[in-house]
Image: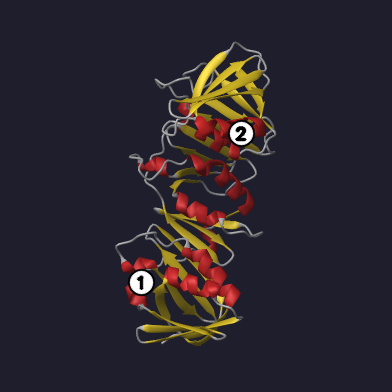
Amino acid sequence: MVKFLVDHKTFLNGLNAVASALPPKTSLPSLSNILLETDGDQLRLAATDLDTTVVTLIPATISSQGAVALPGKKLLEIVRELSGSDVSISTTGSRTSISCEKSSFTLPCSSRDSYPSLPSSVSDSDKIGLPLNLVNKAIKKTAYAVAGASEIRASLTGLFWKLNSESLEMVATDGHRLAKVKMSEITGDSEIEAILAPKALNLLLKLSSEQPVFISSQGTQISFHVDDTSIYSRMIEGPYPPYEKVIPQGNNDILKVNREDIFSALKRMRIIANPATHQIMFTVEHNRVILQAENTDAGEAREDVEATYDKDPLQIAFNGNLIMDILRNMNSENVLFHLHDSSTAVIITEEIQEEGTDYLTLVMPVRLPDTV
C-alpha cells in the first residue's frame, strides 16, 4: 500500500513533465502507465517508451512508502481538472483512490514489478553543465530539418550533436534541406558526439528554467538533467552523413531580401501551389525576385518582392514549405540567399548573426516537369 498527499499544482506540473514521454500507441500496456514511487519525503514520477524516459521528483507528504503505476493519460486528465490545493492518493490492492476537495476517483493500478526498470542515476562528476537557454536555441534552429520516421536511413531521423572544448555544433538534414548551427559560447570539458532523437530534445524544450542543463553520455544513452527533472534517451546508431561535403563552396551570387516580405509572399503563393510538390518558382532579377506558383486546378499566382541583387538573372524552383520552415526559424530582419545556378543547393543565412553563433541553412532546388 502506498499513501501520500501532494500539492495539486506541483503534482500537475510533474505529470506534465513526464507525460510527454508516453508513447501514442503501444502493444505493451505497462508503457501507457506513469510510475509514482515514493523516495523519502519526495515522490518520483516517471514515464517511458523504452527509447526515451523522463523522471522528475516533487515534494510530498508520505504516509506509506511504496510505488504504483497508474494509467498515464487518464491520471493527467483527472489531475488537470481537479479543483483544490491538495491531492490525496492511496492504493489498496489493484485500485488507487484519488481525492481532492469534493472530488474522488478510483483507477486500476499495477505493481512496481510490472513497470520497466528506470535508467540508473548519473553521478555529478560525469555531468557537463551547459546554459539551457542557449542549448534550446540551438535545438530550435535545427530540429525542424530532421527527417521523418519513415526515412530508411535511421541516422537522418535524429539531430547530430557535437560538443567539445571549442563549441557546440548541431546539424539536422532530411536529404532535401540542412540546418547547421555552431555556438562558441557553449563548450564542454569532454567531447560528446551523438545522434539524438527529436522526442528527447522536444521534451528538453519544454523545460523552462534559469538553471543550467547537465548532460551525461554513457554507452548508447545520453541524459539531460534540469533541476529535479531528468530525460534519458537512447542514441540513434550512426554514422551521421558527411554533411560538410554537400555544402557548396561557390555560391557567390547574393540575393538579399526582407525576411517578413519573402515569408508573407510565400504564404500567399502556397494557396495556389501544387499541394503535392509545393513548388514555387523564384525568378531573380536586378533588385527584385518574382515568385510564381501554378496549379492546373487552382490557377496561377505571382508576386514581386523587392530585393538587393546585381548578378545575372536566374530562375530556380523550390518546395515553398521548406523555405518557409527556414525563414520561420530565423530572426534577422534580412536574409541572404547564396546562389550559383538553378540546380545547385542554395545556402540561406541571416544577414546579421547573433554574437557567438554561426547559423547556416541549405535547401535543394526542385526540377519538376510542371514548372511555371
Classify mark 1: helix, strand or loop: loop
In the image: residue 261, left or right of residue 236: right
Give the residue displayed 42% in from the left and 79% down from the top.
67
Residue wearing tag 2: 263
* Vertical arrangement, residue 78 with respect to residue 255, above or below: below
Q: Secondary structure at mark 2?
A: helix
Task: Give the label on residue 73, or none.
Answer: none
In this rendering, which labeled residue sits more in front, label 2 or label 1? 2
Q: Return the disc, 2 or 1, that comes first in the chain's sequence.
A: 1
Location of mark 1 (residue): 115
Q: Residues within 10 Å of mark 1 (few under 14, many from 20)?
A: some
Q: Position of residue 103 (x, y in %)?
A: 52, 83
Q: Where 56 sits versus 304, above or below?
A: below
**Residue 354 visible to an observer of this rendering:** yes
Amino acid identity at mark 1: Tyr
Q: Residues within 10 Å of mark 2 (few under 14, many from 20)?
A: some
Q: Position of residue 23 (x, y in %)?
A: 39, 60
